[in-house]
Image: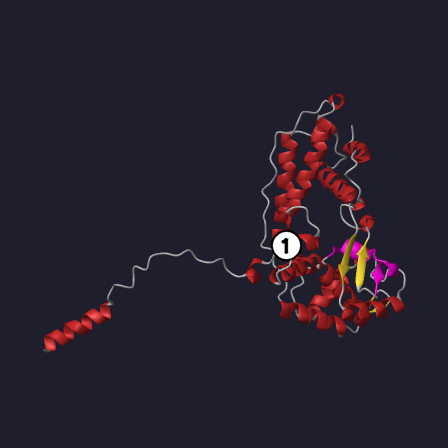
């Protein structure tokens, strides 16, 4: 039986999957497996040999990053285990391991770097969709950094989600990852002014002048204008890490601000370089009572001269 058909059944029966993006990532994994097999994958392909060869092919031939490959393999094993628990398909439980995951050091902008980014946004002389960049970027960056929310939630904001009297922005649960609860964040007066200027030009979904998938190219261009790195680790999620790091440095609760349920998840967002080194343990000072070689030679010369 085709795995694409079984994936549809898995999605229909799994109440935890609520995002179309999650479904698309599962589909992309099966597409990658199909490219290796040069046909549509079936339940007969769920075996250790095929899995191992596919992982090696993705790593060595396609050059997929370790973190991406780990995520693809994890999704394939989720589908595999779900199928194996249903005896009518005749598939055995997987006895394979996930490829090793490389955990890069999570870093973000220091304050000087972010200042360059916002300066480039306010001086931007090109358009984001139909909106002048000098109008769009100050509002977007302000809300992104002060709220710490993800691009998906920012992209879906409407004008009525802003309360300019209380200086607040509300992110509805249905627009957020997990879709579990609403989140209200404070914004500064400057950000409120910038957002009002943007809403005057685009009252409906002000932060969505382009499709979400098309928002990465203009942001890379902005980073280049600011003279900042524009690699994958410096895109929109870097603003979320900047928010978490700044909240922590100012004595706030980064876990609560990011609305994480696990403190370990929040720890991965903090830029350890900016937190400073850990204190060194105390050790006995064995060097203090010793005389240096130079001092000994000086005494020796004095004794001979006498």
The foreground one among 6 and 140 is 140
Is residue 62 shown to the viewer in this render?
A: no
| In this picture, residue 101 sits left or right of residue 277 | right
**Quadrant of the rendered image containing residue 160:** bottom right
Location of the C terminus by quadrant is bottom left
- Residue 67 position, x and y percent, is 63, 47
**Quadrant of the rendered image containing residue 114:** bottom right
- Residue 167 position, x and y percent, is 80, 65
Count the marks: 1
- Asked which secondary structure carries label 1, the reply is loop
Is 56 one of the magenta-colored residues? no
Point 72% across, 62% down: residue: 146
In the rendered view, tell whether residue 51 sits above or below residue 226.
Answer: above
The foreground one among 109 and 233 is 109
The span shown in magenta is 149-164
The foreground one among 66 and 19 is 19
Colour scheme of the picture: secondary structure
| Residue picked out by circle 1 | 269
In the rendered view, tell whether residue 69 sits above or below residue 81.
Answer: below
Residue closest to the far bottom: 305
Point 57% across, 62% down: residue: 274
**Quadrant of the rendered image containing residue 35:** top right
Location of the N terminus by quadrant is top right
> How would you rate the neighbour count of disc 1 (Cα within 10 Å): few for under 14, some for 14-19, many for 20 or more?
many
In the rendered view, tell whether residue 156 sits above or below residue 9.
Answer: below
Point 76% across, 48% down: residue: 177
Is residue 182 shown to the viewer in this render?
A: yes
- Residue 38 position, x and y percent, is 73, 37
């Amino acid at each position: 039986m085709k795995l694409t058909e079984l994936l549809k059944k898995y999605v229909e029966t799994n109440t935890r999957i609520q995002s179309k993006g999650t479904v698309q990532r599962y589909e992309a994994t099966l597409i990658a497996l199909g490219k290796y097999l040069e046909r549509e994958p079936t339940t007969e392909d769920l075996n250790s040999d095929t899995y191992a060869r596919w992982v090696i092919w993705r790593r060595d031939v396609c050059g997929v990053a370790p973190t991406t490959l780990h995520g693809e393999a994890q999704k394939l094993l989720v589908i595999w285990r779900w199928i194996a628990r249903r005896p009518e398909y005749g598939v055995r439980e997987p006895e394979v391991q996930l490829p090793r995951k490389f955990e890069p050091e999570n870093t973000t902008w220091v304050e000087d770097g972010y200042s360059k980014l916002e300066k480039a946004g306010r001086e931007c002389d090109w358009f984001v969709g139909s909106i002048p960049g000098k109008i769009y970027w100050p509002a977007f960056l302000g809300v992104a950094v002060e709220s710490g929310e993800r691009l998906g939630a920012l992209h879906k904001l409407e004008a009525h989600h802003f309360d300019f009297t209380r200086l607040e922005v509300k992110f509805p649960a249905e627009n957020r990852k997990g879709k579990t609860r609403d989140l209200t964040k404070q914004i500064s007066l400057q950000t409120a002014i910038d957002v009002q200027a943007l809403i005057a030009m685009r009252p409906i979904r002000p932060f969505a002048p382009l499709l979400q998938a098309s928002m990465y190219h203009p942001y890379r261009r902005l980073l280049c204008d600011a003279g900042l790195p524009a690699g994958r680790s410096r895109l929109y999620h870097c603003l979320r890490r900047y928010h978490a790091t700044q909240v922590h440095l100012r004595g706030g609760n980064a876990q609560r601000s990011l609305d994480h349920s696990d403190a370990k998840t929040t720890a991965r967002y903090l830029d350890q370089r900016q937190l400073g080194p850990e204190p060194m343990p105390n050790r006995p000072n064995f060097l203090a009572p010793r005389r240096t070689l130079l001092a000994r030679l000086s005494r020796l010369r004095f004794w001979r001269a006498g």
